[in-house]
Amino acid sequence: MERDVLFRPDRFKYVRKLMKPEGCVFCKAAKSEPSFETLCVYKSKYSMIVLNKFPYNSGHLLIIPLKHEGDLLALSKEAYADLNDTLRLAMKALQDTYQPGGVNVGLNHGAVAGAGIPDHLHYHLIPRWAGDLNFFPLIAETKVVVESLEQTYDRLLSYFTRKS
């Protein structure tokens, strides 16, 4: 069976830019207060919730340890537990604010597994709805995201502010 391949040369430029000599974009967010500039909407003791700058769907979140670590097994028990608690909190936020029909949860562990930033772990949470993959991406080679990053940020920041 032949498989279609999606070519995303723009993604390579983005990934290369993230790991410039100035350092890791996730570490920059970890060292800053939550803001639209960093796209961080929530921080716990060991982890944070950040919007994906190039979302596959509205509400696409990244759950990231604050520590610059590329190996899940190297996290302390406390950091690992906190990361999972934060993952659950993000899932609840998506359920409460977007009411998706489902959510894709994924971790690409290492560059060979597809991690765009392999030296800093991050889970993806992507809300999904029936029919969200319509004909437009196939015909126009474009994904329609129905909400701006600023709208998504405001919606989720409001949720986490109420929960704090």
Image (cartoon, rainbow, N blue to C red):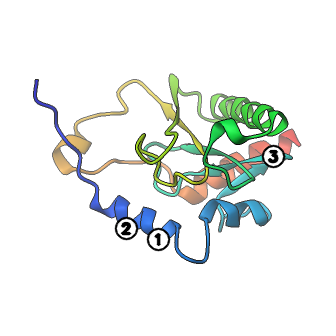
- Residues at marks 3 and 1, CA–CA distance in whole angstroms: 25 Å
Residue 54, compared with residue 83, is above or below; it is below
- Residues at marks 2 and 1, CA–CA distance in whole angstroms: 6 Å
Give the side of residue 122 with respect to residue 164, left or right.
Answer: left
- The residue tagged 2 is 13
Q: Residue at x 66, y 64 (%)?
A: 38
Residue 141, compared with residue 22, is above or below; it is above
Label 3, residues with CA under 10 Å away: few <14, some 14-19, many ≥20: some
Q: Quadrant of the C terminus?
A: top right
**Residue at the front extreme of this rendering:** 74
Closest to the observer: 129 or 17?
17
Considering the numbered disc 2 on the image, is that residue within a helix, a strand or a loop?
A: helix
**Which image quadrant for residue 159?**
top right
- The residue tagged 3 is 46
Q: Which mark is residue 100?
A: none
Residue 125, compared with residue 53, is above or below; it is above
Label 1, residues with CA under 10 Å away: few <14, some 14-19, many ≥20: some
Residue 45, compared with residue 102, is above or below; it is below
Q: Are marks 2 and 1 in contact (CB under 8 Å)?
A: yes
Give the side of residue 29 with respect to residue 57, left or right.
Answer: right
Q: Residue at x 72, y 63 (%)?
A: 35
**Which image quadrant for residue 86?**
top right
Q: Quadrant of the N terminus?
A: top left
Mark 1: amino acid: Lys
- The residue tagged 1 is 17
